[in-house]
Image: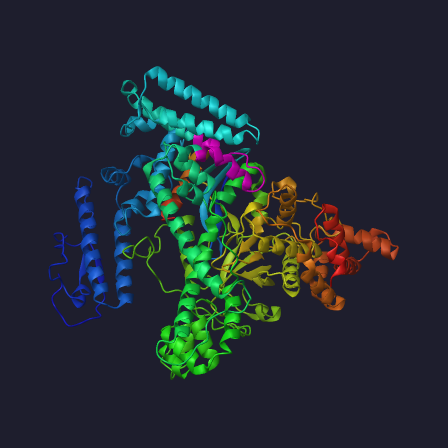
Amino acid sequence: MGGGGSKTHENFTVTPGGTAPGPAAAVGPEEVGPSAEDTLQQDVHLPELPGPDGDWAAAYAAIVDEHTSTGSLLFKAIVADAPTAELEAAVVQLNAATKAWLEQVPPAELAKLAAAAGFEHPGLVGLGEGSSPLVHWLDPSYLSNVASKAKIQAKALERYDALCAGETIGGLTLASYTATGPPPPGGGGEWAASPGDVVDAQSALASRLVELKAASHADRAQAVADLVAAENHLATAACPELGEHLATAQAAGRNSVDSALGSLPYAPGAAGVKATAAVAVANGVADGVLTGDQAKVLTPAEALTLCRLSTPKVVREPLESAAADRNAQIANLDGLVEAHTAIQASPGTPLSLPALSGGVGDPGKAALASFAGDAGQLYPLVSATSSWRRAALDAGSTPYVGSPEELTTSFRAWAKTQKLNDLREAAFTLGHPEALTATRAQTQNLIAASWDPALNATAITASLKPAKPKPPVKPSSPTGKPAAPAKGVGPPVKPAAIKPTGPTSSSPVPPGPSGKTWAAKHLQLVEALKHHNASTADLPSRFDPAAVSAWTFTPGSGPSLGGAHTKSFHTAPDGSSWMFKPDKTGGGARAHAEAAASDIFHKVGVPSVPVYARTVGGKTGSIQPLLAGTTNLGSDPASWSQADVDAVVRYHVAAWACGDHDGKPDNLLRTAGGGVVPVDQGQAFKFFGRDKLSTAYHPNSSHGVGQAVFHQAYKAAKAGGLAKGVTVRPEASLPVLAAFERLPDASYRALLTPTATEGAKHRVHWYEPMRARAAKTLGKTPAAVTDTEVADAFLDSAIERKQGLRGAFAKFFAGEGFAGAGTITKVA
Amino acid sequence: MRRAWALLAHDPATGAATRPVAVLAVEGADSVVSWVPLEHVAGADWRARLASADPAGNVDTWVEGANGVVWDLVELTPPGTPDLRGDAEALLDDFLAAGT
């Protein structure tokens, strides 16, 4: 061990090889251990790699011991408040050295080590050319219960089931696998079965599989329940006479049911999935296999997995843990929403906070501090729950609480009525002592930074002090001049500091993978993207396209993924992450159309991710900023709130104006604030000249593509498939219709000119119908029409459509039978 | 000719479709999918997409239409194991080894 010294900032070095020390003496809480300074001087020695006849088990045990003792020492250093950056660097070093050591272990020895540690079927992982997953599973740098390790065990079990069912994996069959591997583990059963009983159970399962495949949509729920019951019966049989053959039969049964449930023909929208699982889940709850509280917060697939008694522990436990976490999230969120709506009844309404007053123990300041703290937890929790809540069987929905930016606006309106000194004292209470000298705007922003990710308290505070030495240069030095942030937007959010991943702080940041597989490179890219700031505002700022054209986008910090990737990630001058999509088929015309549609959406008040047409790396395409904290909209209309459906109606107007019929749920995102944002207008104007404003018009149906979200909403509304109390309100379209009418035709035409000229030049999909229109208008043969005339015909069509939007939607909604259609033509 | 793709789902942490949920391998009219275990929520949209359309016949359309933000698929090089299932599983192992 290192000698005592007074240096407090020595690097923590990791040296592979060398003489392996004896296991470090564990230091119990009651013993006096090394000081924080001493721990930073430790060298970590990993054992040498044993030779072919060496004792790999002992060497691995020494590594595990080293991690245990090092982990203890690091924990003590943390407690002693040693510099975090060096500790994290040391953890990364140790992790990298351990991984490098394990990667040199021969595959057969890896399998033995894993089997000795309890891994089932180690011979069924490591089928790829890169590192074996067993390297990660054995790595003591990660806790044994991390999800990434559970996935590896689960996949091995799944592959064994497939072999038992008669499948071949990479040439491996059950016979060839069991000839060389250990016998399958025997399972304890719950009912005593004769060999004949087992055969009967297998037959019954086979029959249920056939029945499920043939079941109509109406009968599917019962067929699923019968299948699960049949599998459970087989899975719980005990028959010593059959020996390992029983385990094989049970594994094969599990594989068959996995396949059957995984390939169910779902009804449109996730509502069909929920109904399909309902009977089986109800039976499972009645039988005590899972609780009602668990079932409510799990997705249908997850709940069915728990209903099946054959589900291995490595899959069951994470689901049970997830259910507990989700129930805790809902309880916490419900409390936060209740407290929040007591102050702000709905987004955009005034805050009913008590006035601040001077003096010690001012309850107004306490109320503000409580409100700010709760709001700081509210939005991230809304975002965290939205990824699963809508897909869960019966978890309800989160009331719409608006965006952090909306709350900031409401807060500023309230704060204007308060004395500056009182606000400063309130900010002080929230942990900002520098606020005592801040301006009103700075003070308000410091308080609002509690919940608004667009505001950076650290940057605001720094601006209140004399200039300090500049921080170290970031790895990717952006070039080019960033555009000024939009008014009201604070300084950009800084990239998150590197933090350990995993369920506890003792799980370190994964090192850069040493493998050269695409998967390893992809993981590096993902980590790089996480550390850059994807926009954390509800919507990114929109910049002048000319400015964006002039920016220098540096390649994202991750490695290039090669030509097989159709998209690439880049860093803008302000450090934000952007995605570039090359326009491979339209010569840039598609990119211009997408950019124009994005701009139109913005101008008429439909939230959209800003898209710009430009050239990157010699390729023409579209580039857009990434939004962090977003989740899928969800494909179940029953999960959409009234605000969602209203947003979808507004989106429909803009989409029709732009001839975009590709608005599927998976082309929309839900922002951290709960807003709905289209993210892909790549098909804008594609079907211009042929398209129809009709729920029956679905030009992409032949490619297995789902219907546009607005059509799904209208159909669900008519079939009673929307949530209780949610309706299609045609009047929700009024603001967008009015915005289109306020847009001068000349401006609209100018905005679409690049789309028109590029589209005509590259003979895109709308070229022929527009050429026919031009020929008719000009009295020419189509062959005689010039590209300029085709472009003009496109622009004329776009203007006509814009001018006719109100009438078209009034007729459309009336035709669909929605109440309120008449208001469209009566109200401005 | 055998081909393979990583199927990616939206990751709130990156704001893009960077979360691997499965590997799809196709050869002629045959297709095999190997799913990343325990990704029930993230993989749900891809499961629905694959259940509603023949993967072998639609994968190129999906490549063209994927928005890269909510969903995406990236072509990989099949390792050439004796069967299609082996290629899918081998490529999935690369993700598991990387700690996905």
Q: Nearer the viewer, residue A562 or A282?
A: A282
Residue range (magenta): A257-282
The answer to whether residue A473 is seen in the rendering is: yes
Residue A627 in the figure: left or right of residue A8: right
Q: x, y percentage for residue B4?
A: 49, 41
Q: Quadrant of the C terminus of chain A?
A: bottom right
Q: x, y percentage for residue A724?
A: 57, 47
Q: How is the image coloured?
A: rainbow
Q: Nearer the viewer, residue B79 or A497?
A: A497
Q: x, y percentage for residue A260?
A: 48, 31
Q: Quadrant of the N terminus of chain A?
A: bottom left
Q: Nearer the viewer, residue A348 or A408?
A: A348
Q: Main secondary structure of the magenta part?
A: helix
Which residue sits furthest right? A779
Instruction: Give me the residue at 57% from left, 29% from top.
Output: A216
Residue A280 lies in the magenta-colored region: yes
Instruction: Give me the residue at 17% from left, 39% from top.
Output: A53
Instruction: Give me the residue at 22% from left, 62% from top.
Output: A13
Residue A632 lies in the magenta-colored region: no
Q: x, y percentage for residue A83?
A: 26, 68
Q: Is residue A139 above or below residue A379?
A: above
